[in-house]
Amino acid sequence: MGQLTEFFMKSAGGPPPAEGFSMPMMKGWVPRRIQPWIYVLTAFCFQFGGGVYLGAMEGIRGTTNLMMEDVLFLMYSTLAGMAVYFPMLFRMKFRFTNRQLLCGSATILGACNLLTMHCQSMPVLAVACFIAGMAKIQGTFECMSNIQTWITPKRDFAAFFPVLHIILLTAIEGSGWLAAWFGHHFTWQMMHVFTIGTMSFVLLTQIVFCRPFCPMPQRMSLKGIDFQGGLLICGLMLTLSYIVVYGDYLMWLDSLRIRLLIAAAMVLLGMVLYRLHHYRYPYVELSLFTLRNVVPILIVTFFAELALGAEHTMEEILYSEVLSLEEPTKEAQFMWALPGMYAGILLDLYWLKVRKWKIWKLFGIAFICIAFYGMLMYFTLDMNVNIEQYRPAIFLRGFAYGVLSPALMWALNESVPSLEQFFMGLFIFNTLHMYLAGAAGFGIYTGIFSNLMNDNMISYGQYLTPTRLDMAHFDLAGYIGQNFLHSMMMVTIKQVYGYVIWFALALAAIFLLCDIPAVRTNIRKVPRWPVYAIEYLAKKN
């Protein structure tokens, strides 16, 4: 294991840092100064790719028979493919050359985009988006692992993860805006054409500038990988995403399909747990959860994504259903999160790299920002407000996301001793971070919104009676269809943001208290309940 780790660390930049940075996969005539920038550009190409693009949702819904839930399910299929492939990255790095990995990923991602551009079959699209997610993360990892020591010669992950997230978060926000721009000026398929073009650029650069190179002299075999366990996990993830995405549309447990899928998910979960316990080389080692701080980090990740889930649901309802913004305007509004993300990443660099402070207070600051984001949205929401007034709130949620994403990944790396276990930990982390918590947040927030909306319609609708209105001069249908409905939606969105505020403030208080030494000491000294009861009875007697 130590030998493999040593090979991996050396492969990131060729010779040790003292000898200078070099990329052995580059041809000799390529100037050293531009070598890493070629891989940075290649990483951007992979990150801007995907299966479907939410920025093109309006065009997709207008020209195909796909609903909003279908597009969201396909997006979560891509995220599931990215998350489930993390344990494979370590083995693939030492099995194939850089050219094989990058050319293969580019070819697969281009083919998947060609398929999603012309196909409307949901099963085929779900599989294509899932595979596209795997190819996307493979290409990104291969690029970033090769320029790791260029970013930080000392291989300090407190610097590497923030820089990595500059690329990731820029692509997340930029791809949505670019897809909306293409859909507005051309057609939604043009974003897929653009992705196919970027993948062609990746193939061209690999042929012209690079040569085959593998950091492992003796190629590592893929034998021993629990492919069956991985497939079971894939099935479980897709089943869960279908339940949470379509749950509100199908009326949850009132639908026979949802009940059957819940039963199937329970069966798949049992099979996965049995295989993880009894297979000699499981897809994910359960001992990972016994490592120090791993479970708390995963819990924080889940709660953070749950708190930020209002971004995906409430803002989409506000901008699309209430304000009726077009996709380019909406995506341009979302781009204001990007400066906030950069500011959060800079805070991480200062906090973790320069000052080396403890991370609990950093988490507290992020959740305070989420609470202030909810407050700004709560007090700004109004039909007569300019959309520019929502930008400070969007900046704050971007700041919180930019703080939490690199910090949580760094904390996980500090808690996992071996490199192979770290990639398994990244699978669990990204399953919660990119996929499961986001999908669960969508299901939870849409469910809460629907229930509150129904209650508000009943509560306020009882005051609209013919005896209170001059029906000869009042357009009741127009009022209910526009003013009344939009007002009820505004009130409901405010109520949901109220829950988000209290939830984020409670989490911020917990993290800030955990950073106080006296509180941490007192928590450790609290005895178990039976001991406490015995001591209490002894004092009474």
Image (cartoon, rainbow, N blue to C red):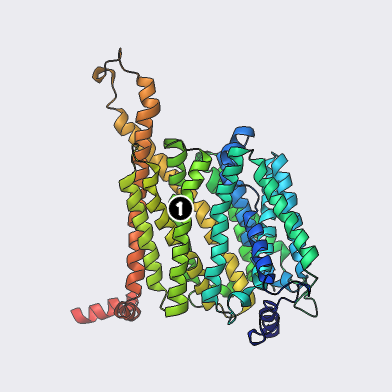
Residue 519 visible within the image? yes
Q: Say what amino acid the circle numbered 1 marks.
A: Trp
Is residue 337 depicted above or below 250 in this figure? below
In the image, residue 489 lies at what x, y percent? 38, 37
Which residue sits furthest left?
540
Give me the residue at 54% from left, 64% from top: 166
Residue 218 figure quarter? bottom right
- Check the image and report above or below for 383 versus 29: above
Quadrant the N terminus occupies: bottom right
Give coordinates of residue 433: x percent, y percent: 52, 61
Q: Could you say where residue 294 lies in the image, as x and y percent from the top left?
A: 51, 73
Along the viewing direction, whichever of 388 and 516 lies nearer the viewer: 388
Q: Secondary structure at mark 1?
A: loop
- 140 left or right of 367? right
* Residue closest to the far bottom: 18
**Could you tell me if residue 72 is visible in this image?**
no
Which residue is disc 1 drawn over? 336
Residue 231 image point, x, y percent: 69, 59
| Local crowd size for mark 1, using a 10 Å CA cut-off: few (<14), some (14–19), many (≥20) | many
